[in-house]
Image: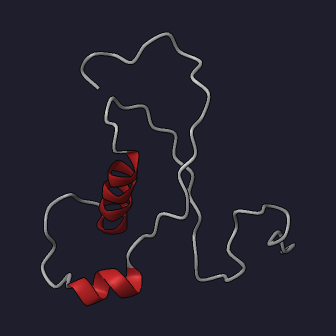
């Protein structure tokens, strides 16, 4: 398999990581808090507590937010229920 480590600057150079990119639209002003919540939910696949998931497990194996970027808005408005 060809090594694409240097083809994308956001890719970690360690094969122990999976880098994911999300596009999110929200009315919240605290996008960092939102990004951290989404990362936490993606780690376990749920927003409720999981038995055996300690703070140390989260530190060792939990998702990390590498960066948050503002994308240009191409839509006229966000639906009211979002």
Vertical side of 16 occupied by 11: above or below: above
Name the image quarter holding residue 25: top left
The answer to whether residue 38 is left or right of residue 9 is left
The answer to whether residue 74 is left or right of residue 30 is right
Q: How many marks?
A: 0
Point 87% across, 72% down: residue: 2
Who is closer to the viewer here, 21 or 44? 21
Q: Position of residue 34 (x, y in %)?
A: 34, 49
The answer to whether residue 30 is left or right of residue 47 is right
Point 47% across, 63% down: residue: 65
Vertical side of 20 occupied by 63: above or below: below
Check the picture and name the quadrant holding the C terminus. Answer: top left
Outermost residue toward the top? 76
Q: Position of residue 45 (x, y in %)?
A: 30, 61
Scheme of image coloration: secondary structure
Name the image quarter holding residue 63: bottom left
The answer to whether residue 51 is left or right of residue 29 is left
Check the picture and name the quadrant holding the N terminus. Answer: bottom right
Point 58% across, 76% down: residue: 17
Name the image quarter holding residue 46: bottom left
Vertical side of 4 occupied by 37: above or below: above
């Amino acid at each position: 398999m060809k090594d694409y480590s240097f083809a994308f600057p956001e890719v970690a150079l360690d094969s122990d990581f999976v880098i994911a990119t999300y596009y999110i639209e929200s009315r919240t002003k605290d996008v960092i808090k939102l990004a951290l919540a989404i990362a936490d939910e993606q780690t376990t696949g749920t927003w409720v507590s999981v038995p055996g998931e300690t703070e140390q497990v989260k530190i060792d194996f939990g998702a990390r937010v590498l960066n948050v970027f503002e994308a240009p808005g191409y839509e006229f408005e966000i639906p009211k229920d979002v």
